[in-house]
Amino acid sequence: MKQALALSAVAVIALVAASAPVLAQAPAAKPAPAAAKKAAKPVAAPVEEKDAATLEFEKFRAKMIEEGNPAELFEAQGEEMWKSSRGPKKVSLATSCDLGLGVGVVKGAYVQMPRYFADAGKVMDAERRIVWCMVEKQGFKEADLHAKPFGSGTYTPDQTSLVTYVAANSKDMKFAVPLKDPHVKDVYEIGKETVAYRAGPYDFSCNTCHGADGKRIRMQQLPNISTQKGAATAVLGWPGYRMTGNVMLTSQWRMNDCFRQQRFPEPKYASDTVTALLTYMTANANGTTYTGPGIKR
Amino acid sequence: MDTLRRTVLKGASASGVLATALAAGLLKPTQVLASEWNKAAFEAKDTPAAMKAVGAATTAESKDLKLTAPDIAENGAVVPIDISSGIPNTISIAVFVDKNPSPLTAAFNFANGAMADASLRIKMGQTSIVRAVAKTADGKFYTASKEVKVTAGGCGG
Amino acid sequence: MGSPMKVRAQMKGDFADIKILMSHPMETGQRKDPKTNQPFPALFIQQFSVEVGGKVVVQAETGTAISTNPVFGFKVKGAKAGDKVVVKWQDNKGDSRTDEATIA
């Protein structure tokens, strides 16, 4: 049975101010058609049937990216920042920051993160690593970079533009989070436990929305991040230009917003927990192709 | 030169006179941009008034005017519209959104090889009919329209 | 001077496919600042021109219903690889921006 009924029920005529969609109750988990009910294994990705609206939205996003994604404007800003001498130490990231493939190497770096950085003694995702470089190499104060880390209609944090530039340099490359590294594997396992951890007033876990096939909230189908296909859907498109508010946002923001929607306390920006979550879902997407900064609802 | 200056001041959406000057290759960008912005048309509160303000008193529907738009807009803030006119001698195209506070979104004049083809991204306040109006060199107007549904989104993905 | 645009132009058969990404808030003047409850003043591109090989090929007038960070696409016959495409916009406050590209 197609999702037609669900579709007409949710095709609300008026545009509700959707800058902060409120998850007022447990998401309506519509049962997926029988064809999609297959055991989920990370390797053999189950068939996640997409309804007409989802398919149209995917086509629309692909067209938008091809014809002109405003994310490119932030990528251009990020490139300039990467190459300029900045901060109290007046040093450029291009000459000082190692994203895992060598100092200054941006090509291919985004899809190989999160990864372990010996100089920091931590597994870090792209944004966290960039902030680390800004602090350690350029002399910026960590507290300043953590103060307002997410974009708004009138403000874009430096690290957002930098992440967009770095991510753009991994376009059309396959995700390859180094799971063979024991440090990364440990953090992956923490991430796996974290997504199952229930808390907050609704007793939600990440898995409540993202742990099984066939879930949706209004017009948005929710990817099952425990599968390769679902994980890919989740990590593709980040960092992304969000049409709601016309703002450039990263996956660090996305994690923060998920916590907010679950009515959890705010996660610490660029913390171990956020890295663990990003490690879990990005590694699950290993082997799939990253299409570059995206465009989001 | 005075006539040219006067016609230039009228702007694209005022009449086809600018289009003629454009086609004659007489205009430089600075002159083009010095022309008046058609305030009356852009501030008209309904489609009939806006269309009148761009000179489109009577229109005829045409299957040769192709308007492509999504059935459902994922976000009303950014709705991609593609217009392609197969009507010979199309010199300008204007786009209206009936239910927007001010329906006229944009008007384009084409000249010197530009095809009567435009893609743009518009804001829509709610589900509405989107209209394309094409003007031909002989002063006739043609229309095509499509309803675009604007929804409440879901999760922030 | 406004923020840089991205102009891309490519020959596709017998026409040049031009894509323009402008950086502009396209503020309608309706949206309110949540902190002050005052509307952000209207700030939007009103006109732009597209020139190919020295001739104006598109002249446009735009309003507040054009999306923030506008994207436009046009097709031009009679153009050829190597021709210069120049785009210039102007907003309601008199700010303007010019950027160019070469047809690939």
Image: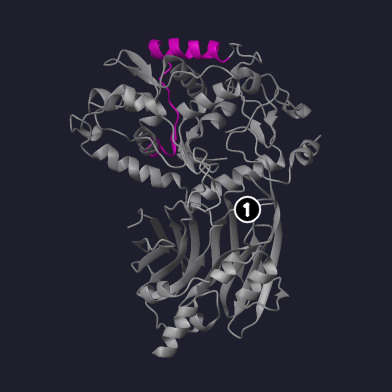
Give the residue displayed 74% in from the left and 38% down from the top: A10
Location of residue C99 (image quadrant): bottom left
The residue lying toward the viewer, choosing from A36 and C60, is C60
Local SS, label 1: loop
Q: In which quarter of the image is the C terminus of chain A?
A: top right
Inspect the magenta stretch and tell me whether residue A178 lies in it: yes
- The image shows residue A152, relative to residue B11, as above or below, that is above
Please report the bounds of the magenta region as a residue range.
Answer: A167-195
Callout 1, which amino acid? Answer: Met
Q: Mark 1 points at which residue?
A: B124
* Total marks placed: 1
Q: Residue at x 53, y 27 (%)?
A: A257
Q: Which of A124 and A152 is in front in this view?
A: A152
At label 1, counting other C-alpha atoms closer than 10 Å, the crowd grade (few under 14, some 14-19, many 20 or more) is many
Locate residue B105: give its quadrant: bottom right
Q: Position of residue A36 (x, y in %)?
A: 72, 27
Q: Let me know if residue A121 is in the magenta part.
A: no
Q: In which quarter of the image is the N terminus of chain A?
A: top right
Colouring: one colour
Position of residue C29 measured from the top left corner of the image (x, y, whole percent): 52, 53
Please give left or right for residue B149 compared with residue A205 in the image: right
Residue C80, relative to residue A92: is it above or below? below
**Residue beneath the point at 52% across and 39% down:** C34
Residue C22 quadrant: bottom left
Residue A146 in the image, given as x and y percentages of width and height: 37, 24
Q: Judge whether A247 appears above or below B4 on screen.
A: above
In the rendered structure, the answer to whether residue A236 lies left or right of residue B97 reads left
- Residue B28 seen anywhere in this rendered image of the structure: yes
Which residue is more in the foreground, C78 or B93? B93
Whether residue A41 is visible to the viewer of this picture, yes or no, is no
Q: Residue at x 64, y 69 (%)?
A: B50
Q: Is residue C74 left or right of residue A57?
A: left
